[in-house]
Image: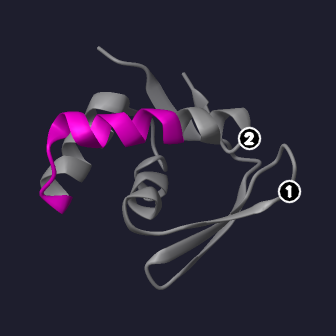
Amino acid sequence: MTALWVRDPRARWRRSGGRVALAAPSDGEVMVLDSTAAVTWELLASPISEDEVVDILAEGFGEDVEVVRGSVVPFLLELCERGAARRL
């Protein structure tokens, strides 16, 4: 089983249409998330595994699981580094 991920409650964010504006706690810099990144952020509302995120995105966007994994894992790590998400 892969690691579980969840939003850090200190992260400030706002949804507008299909996008999410996210201010990371580490630096306050605003990231604008759209497409799969915005969906990933929504999925992090509750603890969820990397595998679950990848499977949901691959199915929802009609992409290959390994292609999705190649972008999701670095994105989760970036969110973690910026203090917006954490690994459980």
Query: Could you say which disc has been placed on residue 45 in the image?
Result: none
Mark 2 vs mark 1, CA separation in Å: 9 Å
Image coordinates of residue 57 in percent, x first then y, are 25, 51
Query: Which residue type does callout 2 highlight?
Result: Arg
Kindly indicate the quadrant of the structure image that contains residue 31. bottom right
Image coordinates of residue 19 in percent, x first then y, are 50, 75
Position above or below: 26 against 59: above
The residue carrying mark 2 is 82
Q: How is the image coloured?
A: one colour
Q: Is residue 50 left or right of residue 57?
A: right
Among the two numbered marks 2 and 1 on one chain, the one whose residue lies closer to the N terminus:
1
Residue at 45%, 35% (x, y): give it.
47
Judging depth in this view, the residue of 46 and 67 nearest the camera is 67
Residue interval drawn in magenta: 61-75
Image coordinates of residue 73 in percent, x first then y, are 43, 33
SS for callout 2: loop
**Which image quadrant: the C terminus?**
top right
Judging depth in this view, the residue of 36 and 15 nearest the camera is 36
Q: Is residue 76 left or right of residue 40?
A: right
The residue carrying mark 1 is 28
- Whether 70 is among the magenta residues is yes
Position above or below: 8 against 43: above
Query: Which residue type does callout 1 highlight?
Result: Gly
Image coordinates of residue 10 in percent, x first then y, are 77, 48
